[in-house]
């Protein structure tokens, strides 16, 4: 029965991947964050029930470095959802630093034979042993500090995420304002479910003198830990309260269960509406390319289109592939070659070199120009001039 919530969470995670993957692959960050915390809730339950020694030996303490990534993963998912794109830069690696420090600190614990760990948890459950076993299993930072620190660290990230959502919710220029408000509610629920037990646990730690004398925190000493296991219901709550986010349908703050019944019919209508919107956006994109001629800029990119037209980059890619039936690089090269041909027809090749024409058309160098020209016309620029001029 203890694994029921974990299995349910895995099934709902699969549901999230099905509905979110195409639009936002960073949904994996959200799923990672939720799953890793669910595992921790199982530890709390098993420690309270004094059972599953093998499970605890495999995952307890070992999971600490991975848990340090839960908060950052959740934050970056929310950020990518709001911005409608995910960008990972080298400077973001600083968010992984606490997890790396934690891993180095508990590395000695990884070297302890598994049978000794199992015996340790059996002894703990029999009240036959203290927590001195862990004293030699870490260095740099004691396990007790890491146990407290990981909760404070992740809670700080969730709070920052909440403030980030509040800030963006107040920005009326955002097209996905309703979705941001839904995520604001979802994050508030996350902080509420995890925050109240965390407050009780902190007070208990501060008031329990025995905890100051041990090398690690025994969650058996803290009765409030079992309240923390309510987090295992987080995703099921999301299914009932935020189906607009779960299924990426038209957002509502709270949706009744009746709304789930006509879901597939509603999803089909939304799909047709989305196609109509994409056709309109495709027309806007083509007009923009032919009127503004942004492709003449040597650094012209998908990001520039998304920025200028205020269309998510993923959607711009879909427009090129599905509606224009050509990838962005090929379409850009075609426009540049067409422009170069117009210049040649206007006798620009008599005043400047072909290399000069290639630069005016937006190509980085003559080699790229010749390659693209031949792909579009089946001949080199020089051959085309001989045949047509």
Image: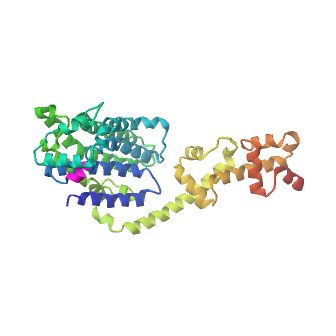
Tell me the residue at 39%/35% (across/down): 97
Query: Magenta stretch: residue 372 in it?
Result: no
Label tally: 0
From this view, report whether residue 115 is shown above or below residue 7: above
Tell me the residue at 38%/47% (across/down): 180
Helix, strand or loop: magenta stretch:
helix
Residue 67 occupies which quadrant of the picture? top left
Report the front residue among 219 and 339: 219
- Is residue 110 found left or right of 117 in the rendered image? right
Q: Is residue 338 visible?
A: no
Looking at the rendered image, the quarter that the N terminus falls into is: bottom left
Q: Where does residue 83 sit, x and y in percent of width and height? A: 46, 45
Give the magenta-colored segment's residue range.
53-57
Residue 172 occupies which quadrant of the picture? top left
Tell me the residue at 67%/54% (across/down): 330
- Is residue 256 found left or right of 124 in the rendered image? right
Report the front residue among 48 and 233: 48
Query: Magenta stretch: residue 54 in it?
Result: yes
Scheme of colours in the image? rainbow
Q: Where does residue 61 sit, x and y in percent of width and height? A: 26, 43
Q: Is residue 20 visible?
A: yes
- Is residue 126 found left or right of 232 in the rendered image? left
From this view, report whether residue 370 is shown above or below residue 19: above
Q: Where does residue 306 sit, x and y in percent of width and height? A: 56, 47
Tell me the residue at 55%/43% (across/down): 307
Q: Where does residue 385 sit, x and y in percent of width and height? A: 87, 51
């Amino acid at each position: 029965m203890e694994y029921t919530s974990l299995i349910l969470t895995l099934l709902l995670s699969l549901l999230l991947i099905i509905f979110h993957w195409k639009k936002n692959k960073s949904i994996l960050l959200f799923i990672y964050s939720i799953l890793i915390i669910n595992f921790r809730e199982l530890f709390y339950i098993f420690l309270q029930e004094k059972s599953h020694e093998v499970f605890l030996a495999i995952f307890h303490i070992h999971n600490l470095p991975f848990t340090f990534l839960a908060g950052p993963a959740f934050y970056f998912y929310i950020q990518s959802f709001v911005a409608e794109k995910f960008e990972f830069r080298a400077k973001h690696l600083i968010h992984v630093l606490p997890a790396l420090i934690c891993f180095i600190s508990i590395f000695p614990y990884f070297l302890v034979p598994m049978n000794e760990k199992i015996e340790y948890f059996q002894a703990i459950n029999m009240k036959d042993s203290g927590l001195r076993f862990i004293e030699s299993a870490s260095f740099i930072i004691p396990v007790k500090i890491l146990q407290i620190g990981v909760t404070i660290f992740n809670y700080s990230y969730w709070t920052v995420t909440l403030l980030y959502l509040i800030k963006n919710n107040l920005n009326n220029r955002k097209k996905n304002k309703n979705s941001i408000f839904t995520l604001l509610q979802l994050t508030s629920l996350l902080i509420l479910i995890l925050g109240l037990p965390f407050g009780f646990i902190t007070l208990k730690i501060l008031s329990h003198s025995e905890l100051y004398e041990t090398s690690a925190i025994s969650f058996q000493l803290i009765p409030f830990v079992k309240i923390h296991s309510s987090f295992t219901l987080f995703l099921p709550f999301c299914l009932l309260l935020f189906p607009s986010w779960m299924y990426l349908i038209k957002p509502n703050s709270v949706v009744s269960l009746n709304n789930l019944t006509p879901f597939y019919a509603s999803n089909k209508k939304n799909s047709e509406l989305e196609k109509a919107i994409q056709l309109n956006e495709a027309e806007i994109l083509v007009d923009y390319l032919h009127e503004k001629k942004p492709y003449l800029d040597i650094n012209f990119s998908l990001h520039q289109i998304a920025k200028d037209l205020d269309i998510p980059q993923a959607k711009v890619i879909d427009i090129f592939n599905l509606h224009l039936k050509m990838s962005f690089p090929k379409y850009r090269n075609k426009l540049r070659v067409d422009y170069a041909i117009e210049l040649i027809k206007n006798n620009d090749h008599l005043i400047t070199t072909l290399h000069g024409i290639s630069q005016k058309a937006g190509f980085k160098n003559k080699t790229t120009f010749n390659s693209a020209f031949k792909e579009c016309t089946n001949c080199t620029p020089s051959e085309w001039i001989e045949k047509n001029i």
